[in-house]
Amino acid sequence: MNRGTLRTGLRAAASLAAVSLFLVAGCSSTGTTAGTSSSKAANLAITFLPKNLGNAYFDTSDKGGKKAIDELGGKYAEVGPAAAAPDAQVQYINTLTQQGVGGIVVSANDKAAICDALTAAMDAKIKVVTYDSDTNPECRNLFINQATADGIAKVEVDMIAKQIGDSGEIAILSASANATNQNAWIDLMKTQLASSHPNIKLVDTVYGNDDDQTSFDKTAGLLSAHPNLKGIISPTTVGITAAARYLSTSSAKGKVFLTGLGTPNQMRQYVKDGTVTEFALWNPADLGYLAAYASAALIKGDITGKTGDTFTAGTLGKFTVGANNTVLLGDPYKFNKDNIDQFNF
Ligand code: RAM
């Protein structure tokens, strides 16, 4: 259980306001700068590249990354596309390679489309860490996984089964069609539904592209296409928030159950008004913080990313690289009306 981890993230969140002020003031880091240098100092210029900008989930995760990079005396930056399209991240990766950053921390919109660009970055001695959504394994040094895919699928299936009485039609409102993370979770949800919930029927899977309006419209579409729908699982913080907003003012409120992965701050009002009973997530700030420490450990040569390597991620403590060059943050955590006010992210 990552309750302790979540608490750590909350404390971190409190200090982020100060961090933001620092940024607004236009101060640059005192850490190592990008580019080749005659000095032997590690190049701790680490840039975060989320699926898209303007997504509260990545705002929080990348602030966690900034906190870690500040602790390390490095130079944090964040760049990214407006839309979570499969190859939209390629141009950013190419630019970062030309700039000679020390590390790229990326959440992939597509596991293959950014591979050539990442391989070129690694050829240029840049350390590549994926977090949140992985690429093909050969295109990065390490993947920082928020929770096991099986555990994420199970928590979502368990929540919807409980909410709809383990019987009836459900649909999935996902992120973009190529997203590595959501697609892995959806495959496992299908397996778990088939093996353990024979009376639940998955009738549709639609894609809101991690865009608020598209996700809102897809929710409306699901409800009109499936009049007997009893539940929606949205394994994306953008999707679940848009779906909750739609349901909260529709006649389906209280009849069609909604669960999935959301942030407490975005979902609070929908839990309080009865649109949503329970949803899950991990602490995105902890994920970004861990990814930044892993990136720095690779850059400094403390680890190579092989199974069994260990490193310390600041206040989160010690982590060990597991199979497939993957580091695991922890377990998913469930939020409901009894605990949601304890969280602020
Ligand atoms: C969205 C993104 C992200 C995912 C979360 C749950 O913010 O799709 O990749 O991990 O939802």
Image (cartoon, helix red, strand yellow):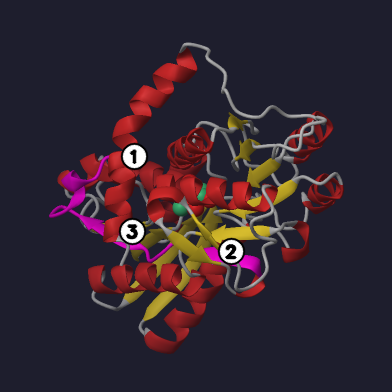
Question: How far apart are the two marked residues, 2 and 3, measured between alpha carbons?
Answer: 17 Å
Instruction: Quickly name the residue at label 1.
Output: 12
* Label ID, residue 280: 3
Where residue 96 appears, x then y in whole percent? 76, 34
The residue range painted magenta reads 325-345
**Which residue is nearer to you in this view: 291 or 201?**
291
Label 3 sits on what residue type?
Ala
* Label ID, residue 234: none
What residue occupies the far left of the structure in this picture?
A: 338
Where residue 72 appears, x then y in whole percent? 53, 38
Circle 3: element type:
strand
Question: How far apart are the two marked residues, 1 and 3, measured between alpha carbons?
Answer: 20 Å
In primary-sequence order, the first of circles 2 and 1 is 1
What residue occupies the far top of the structure in this picture?
A: 25
Residue 206, located in which quarter of the rendered image?
bottom right
Circle 1: element type:
helix
Label 1 sits on what residue type?
Ala
Determine the residue positioned at 45% across, 40% down. Answer: 64
Asked whether, in this view, residue 337 is left or right of residue 305, the answer is left
Question: How far apart are the two marked residues, 2 and 1, measured between alpha carbons?
Answer: 30 Å
Asked whether, in this view, residue 160 is left or right of residue 208, the answer is left
In primary-sequence order, the first of circles 1 and 3 is 1
